[in-house]
Structures are given as C-alpha cells and as structure tokens.
Image (cartoon, grey):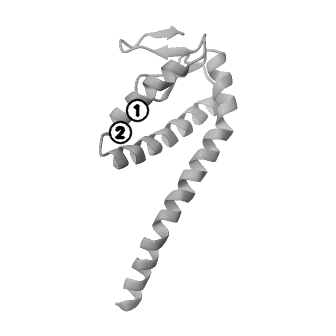
Amino acid sequence: MKKTTALFILFCLCLPALRANNAETIKQNMIKRLPRIQELKKDGMIGENQQGYLEAVQNNIPAADKELVEAENADRKTVYEAIARQQETTVELVGKLRAKKIFEQAKTGEFLKQEDGSWSKK
C-alpha cells in the first residue's frame, strides 16, 4: 500500500514535467512541419478552415502530405484542448478563435475555407 502511494505521488510530481515535455515535443514537431505546410499553402494544395485546422483544397495531395496535415491537426487539437482546459471553455471555441487569427495573418494567395464551405483566396 505504501509503495503504491509513493509511486502515485511520484507520478503526480512528474506530471507537470511530462506535460511540459509533451508541449516541447509538439512545438518542435510543428516547427519541423512548418516549411512544408507553407509550401503546400503557397501551391494551393491545402488551406485553413473555420475551425482552426488545415484541410486539403485539392483531392490529389500526396499521401505523405496528407499524413503531415493529419499530424499538424492532431497537434493543434492537443494545443486547443490544453487552452480550453486552462480557460474553462470548449475546444471548438478555441479553434474558431484561432482560425480568426490565422485568417488575419494568412498570406495573399492562400486558401481560406468560408463558413458556407467554399474556398476563397486571400
């Protein structure tokens, strides 16, 4: 019983470090993906949707790029979830607020998905 309690306390003490480590991993992964994401946006292959996630504009993107988009969206969701917990709000609201910022910062020629589901270039 004491050994289990001690392990539980140790786990609880390490939890913040695990979260910080996870955050750093996510950050590094997002930084590594950024050049390819920017390239795909520039080429009109992907764009940003109203929920704060990447989405394919064209159906013919290579499998490796689809995987890259999925990985980026998974990391974005993890970040949105953490922010939602911290702010005591929903993941959906965090994503929508982030989408607004992304839309404002989008470069000319990048695709943005409108609320009606259509794509437009900035």
Q: Is residue 16 left or right of residue 94?
A: right
In the figure, is residue 2 to the left or right of 18? left
Element under label 2?
Answer: helix
Q: What residue would you read off at disc 2?
A: 91
Quarter of the image where one finds residue 62 = top right
Which quarter of the rendering shows the N terminus?
bottom left
Which residue lies most toward the bottom here? 2
- Quadrant for the C terminus in the image: top right
**Distance Cα–Cα, label 2 vs label 1:** 6 Å
Q: Quadrant of residue 7?
A: bottom left
Residue of label 1:
95
For mark 1, does the 10 Å Cα neighbourhood hold few (<14), some (14 to 19), or many (20 or more) residues? many
Residue 10 at x, y = what percent? 46, 78
- Residue 49, percent across and down? 45, 22
Q: Toward the viewer: 50 or 16?
A: 16
Q: Seen in the image, is 87 located left or right of residue 54? A: left
| Residue drawn at 63 percent across, 28 percent down | 37
- Displayed quadrant of residue 97: top left
Give neighbour class at mark 2: few <14, some 14-19, many 20+ (Cα, 10 Å): some
Tell me: residue 114, above or below residue 48.
above
